[in-house]
Amino acid sequence: MVRTASGEHRGSVIDAAEIGLGTLRYPFRRIRPSPSLLATPCSRMLNLKDLCLITGKASWLAYLDIYCLNADGSLFDAALISAVAAFTHLEIPLVSVGDDGKLFTVGGNDGKNKFELVNREKRKLTLGDIPLSLTCALHKGSILTDPTSEEESIIETYVTVVVDSSDRLVSLQKVGGTVTSMATIKECISLAKERRLRLREILIDSVKAMEVDHTE
């Protein structure tokens, strides 16, 4: 969606995240990811200037809609990696300005030759440090990573850690239970860093597969 600048938004770029769960039955409702919780790590990944079309006049408004069809645990982790994959695969389309001053997208080589383009080529977003997360369930001194929905239904304490591609801590959320020791929190962070490396490989392979499907 293209947004023309006005008032307080003039010259700025806005993105929005929304998670749709509908009537989904999720056993441990307290850790449902909120749009604001998901938007925080994602916003640090994006260079919002990439969405700018004409400085001070128009920019893309990026909407991220995530619909969960089957929740089998660690819902926030799945939502975040889905968001990262979507932005990694996203292409900014060609855009032109009509006689009425309104912007419209242009497709195909004929469109390139027929219209005067604002941006000459399609391009991907320039992504910064990519955030990935790990949810840990704490039970009787043990740490269970990536718990299933069944495990979530009987365990009271969870720690969700988000780290970026530079291994910096982006977000940490603890839900339920009593006070957790610093040693346990540090162990959860260490496990999240290890998992980030595996998830990054999976993400790269998945995006490559999507690009192959797109070109065929």
Image: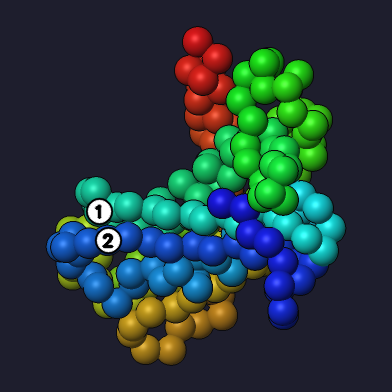
**Label for residue 71?**
1
- x, y percentage for residue 34? 41, 71
Residue type of the residue flagged with mark 2: Leu
The quarter holding residue 6 reads: bottom right
| Badge 1 element | loop
Where residue 196 appears, as percent x and y from the top left, is: 58, 48
Q: Which residue is mark 2?
A: 21
- Residue found farthest to the right: 55
Q: Residue at x 50, y 10 (%)?
A: 216
Q: Residues within 10 Å of mark 1 (few under 14, many from 20)?
A: some
Q: Is residue 80 left or right of residue 24?
A: right
Dot 1 or dot 2: first in sequence order is 2
What residue lies at 64% left-to-right and 30% top-to-bottom? Answer: 106
Q: Is residue 109 visible?
A: yes
Figure quadrant of residue 200: top right
| Discs 1, 2 touching: Cβ within 8 Å | yes
